[in-house]
């Protein structure tokens, strides 16, 4: 699907993978609404993206703020693309603590609420808008890219909440592609490995170096632009549908 002349909603676009994707979409001639809860960072990021970008303060788990973001995207240009990057890390809670007490249910639910319920909320609301488009020459009305994680497949110790939420996103992908096939909307998911974003930036340099050297090839952390390039391919390639693609330099996470 051609990006040029259309608009895209990028959730979590104030930072990291979403911001890099917004940049690539704009370079392809698209217009972007960056939807994020981080107002100050988002406003600065959008100013640097130039005239083709606008910021909307929106929480992906909230129906009315997502409706506002989708309205804004539809005002810019026909809304054909959503790249859903908004998400949070896990609670690093083991199922049992050392004293045998059970893991906290409330933090588990919070992670699932943001990462999985948020993804479904964006998917359903965006699909409803995109389904109203005409089909373009390659047959798409539009396309949606979701973000999982390699933790969906190789969850580490203490990652039950994050892994459950991201495995849910992976699991939804094929169903969504099948559900939305009759509306000519494609849905794909990227499962990143260890990416060099502000989420990771807070780590000590020696820990970051250790993580980078654990990647088989290339021996580095993933760049946000590696993600953005794959997101653009998922948007543009008409035969790519219902797929989760690992973007991880062949890393397989160890138990801890
Ligand atoms: N960085 C990595 O190594 C890595 C690896 C695998 C998966 N991921 C996933 O990639 C996605 C993007 O992560 P990133 O590394 O770019 O992180 P990031 O922290 O740089 O960006 C995430 C953005 O999402 C926003 N956000 C969080 N909750 C939100 C909500 N409820 N509504 C709207 N916006 C919200 C944040 O404000 C932030 O701007 C996340 O879903 C994350 O789980 C990241």
Image: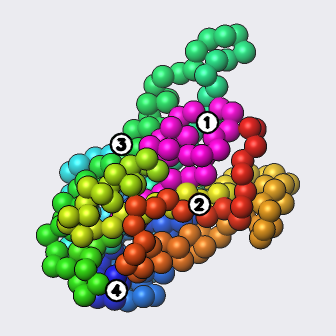
Query: Could you classify mark 3 by the number of other residues whose Cα lies within 10 Å: few (under 14), some (14-19), or many (20 or more)?
Result: many
Which residue is tagged 1? 159
Q: Name the secondary structure under disc 2.
A: strand
**Front residue of this view, candidates 38 and 154:** 154
Label 1 to label 2: alpha-carbon separation: 18 Å
Of labels 1 and 2, the one closer to you:
2
Marks 2 and 4, the one that precedes in the sequence: 4
Q: Position of residue 81 (x, y in %)?
A: 32, 72
Magenta stretch containing residue 150, yes or no? yes
Please identify the quadrant where the N terminus is shown: bottom left
Among the two numbered marks 1 and 4 on one chain, the one whose residue lies closer to the N terminus: 4
The answer to the question of whether label 3 and label 4 lie on touching residues, with beta carbons closer than 8 A, is no
Please name the residue that numbered disc 2 is placed on.
246
Label whose residue precedes the other's in the sequence (3 or 2): 3
Q: Which residue is mark 3?
A: 117
User: Is disc 3 placed on a helix, strand or loop?
Assistant: helix
Marks 1 and 3, how far apart in space?
18 Å
Distance of label 2 from label 4 (alpha carbons): 24 Å
Q: Residue at x 64, y 25 (%)?
A: 94
**Against 212, is 171 above or below?**
above
For numbered disc 4, what is the local secondary structure?
loop
Segment tinted magenta in the rendering: 144-168
**Front residue of this view, candidates 140 and 6:** 140
Whole-percent x, y for residue 106 in the image: 46, 25
**Pointer 2 with pointer 4, Cβ within 8 A:** no
Callout 1 touching callout 3 (CB < 8 Å)? no
Image coords of residue 215 (percent x, y):
78, 60
Quarter of the rendering containing residue 75: bottom left
């Amino acid at each position: 699907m051609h990006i040029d002349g259309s608009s895209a909603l990028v959730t979590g676009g104030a930072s990291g993978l979403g911001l890099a994707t917004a940049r690539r979409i704009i370079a392809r001639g698209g217009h972007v609404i960056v939807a994020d809860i981080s107002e100050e960072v988002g406003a600065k990021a959008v100013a640097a993206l130039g005239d083709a970008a606008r910021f909307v303060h929106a929480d992906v788990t909230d129906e009315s703020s997502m409706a506002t973001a989708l309205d804004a995207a539809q005002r810019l240009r026909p809304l054909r693309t959503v790249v859903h990057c908004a998400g949070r890390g896990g609670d690093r809670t083991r199922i049992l603590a050392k004293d045998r007490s059970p893991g906290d249910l409330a933090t588990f639910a919070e992670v699932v609420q943001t990462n999985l319920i948020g993804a479904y909320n964006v998917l359903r609301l965006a699909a409803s808008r995109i389904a109203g488009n005409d089909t373009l020459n390659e047959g798409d009305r539009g396309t949606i890219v979701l973000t999982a994680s390699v933790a969906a497949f190789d969850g580490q110790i203490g990652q039950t909440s994050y892994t459950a939420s991201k495995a849910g996103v992976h699991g939804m992908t094929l169903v969504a592609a099948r559900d939305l096939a009759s509306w000519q909307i494609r849905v794909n998911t990227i499962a990143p490995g260890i990416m060099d974003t502000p989420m990771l930036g807070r780590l000590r340099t020696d820990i970051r170096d250790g993580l980078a050297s654990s990647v088989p090839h290339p021996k580095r952390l993933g760049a946000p632009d590696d993600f953005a390039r794959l997101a653009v391919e998922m948007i543009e390639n008409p035969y790519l549908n219902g797929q989760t693609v690992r973007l991880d330099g062949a890393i397989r996470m160890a138990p801890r």
